[in-house]
Image (cartoon, coloured by chain):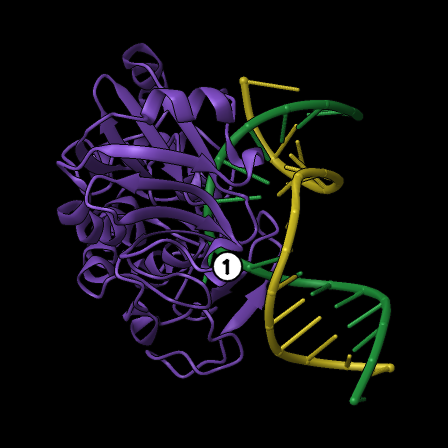
Chain colours: A purple, B yellow, C green
Amino acid sequence: MPELPEVETIVRELGPSAVGRSIVAARVHKDDVLRGITARTLVRRVRGATIAGLVRRAKHAVFELGSWRLVVQPGMSGSLLVHESPLTSAQAQYAVLSLELDDHRVLVYRDVRRLGRIYLLSPAGWKRYDARLGPEPLGGRFTPEYLAARLHRSRQSVKKLIMDQRVVVGVGNIYANEALFAAGIDPSRAGNQVTEASAALLVNEIRRILRAAIRAKGTTFRDYRTGKGERGNFQSDLQVYGRGGEPCVVCGTRLTETHLIDARTTVLCHRCQV
DNA sequence: ACGAGGTCCTGCGAGC
DNA sequence: TGCTCGCAGGACCTCG
């Protein structure tokens, strides 16, 4: 669920209450979300550490703990929240990791489906991890020339390519649908069949839509909550996602919903997207 | 090398 | 009303 705007919102909202605090105790409630580390080792390494920074990279929230980085990837159903007091049993039900801070507040990673991932990486480990990720869509490396070159190397569908985190990070299913509609590109079009002009349009639309979604604090379809536990607001601005069968906002044609591309929900206007 | 499809999980809503 | 089934915003892995 959380794509770039949702993780960006979480990080911005959590930063003020997390950065500068130290971790007095840690608890792993469900260890199947941990990758490359045991619960025991994670708890030992984060206990006593100060949260020097909290940043977003791709769809990950990255806590800077001394030289270690605690990397949380919320997957489909993960959220990060700060609680003012110890967790109630209802709050603890889907808790995966809780960090007790030195002001007695509790920072919790909660994940109903547990498809998210948690890593604790050394500087070298983080460097390797980061290097496998593509450019940030809102950064200077994500240019029309870059995207056109990446698309032209592949016969895969353009939708699958822009959701590939090695091509560009942060774009998931919702924003891929929206950006392709806004750019007038059929999601099933092969990457090597996308013109330079369309690639340039797509870069602009991805950036515009992600920025607008950040301003709206993300899209809440079902589970997503901001770092303050609130719903996002971008769902009311969606033009195609969740609107299969309804009329296209531009031309009135009935929007098509399919699962043929990468087994993910795809909604498009056959008239506007070619 | 690439692409298709299964897999990890739980909850929910549609449909019978 | 109550049950089963399919599907859900992500990403990894294996297989052909």
Hey, what amino acid is under mark 1? Ser
* Left or right: where A206 falls relative to A172: left
The local secondary structure at tag 1 comes to helix
Residue A212, compared with residue A247, is above or below; it is above
Judging by the rendered image, the residue that carries numbered circle 1 is A89
Residue A200, compared with residue C13, is above or below; it is below
Question: Which of the 4 image quadrants contains residue A87?
Answer: bottom left
Q: Give the image location of residue A122, x and y in percent.
A: 32, 14
Q: Residue at x 35, y 14 (%)?
A: A125
Q: Residue at x 33, y 36 (%)?
A: A168
Residue A181, compared with residue A188, is above or below; it is below
Depth check, front residue: A12 or A182: A12
Question: Which of the 4 image quadrants contains residue A195?
Answer: top left
Q: Give the image location of residue A239, x and y in percent.
A: 35, 72
Question: Which of the 4 image quadrants contains residue A64?
Answer: top left
Q: Give the image location of residue A137, x and y in percent.
A: 24, 41
Q: Give the image location of residue A247, x and y in percent.
A: 44, 83
Depth check, front residue: A44 or A250: A44
Depth check, front residue: A105 or A74: A105
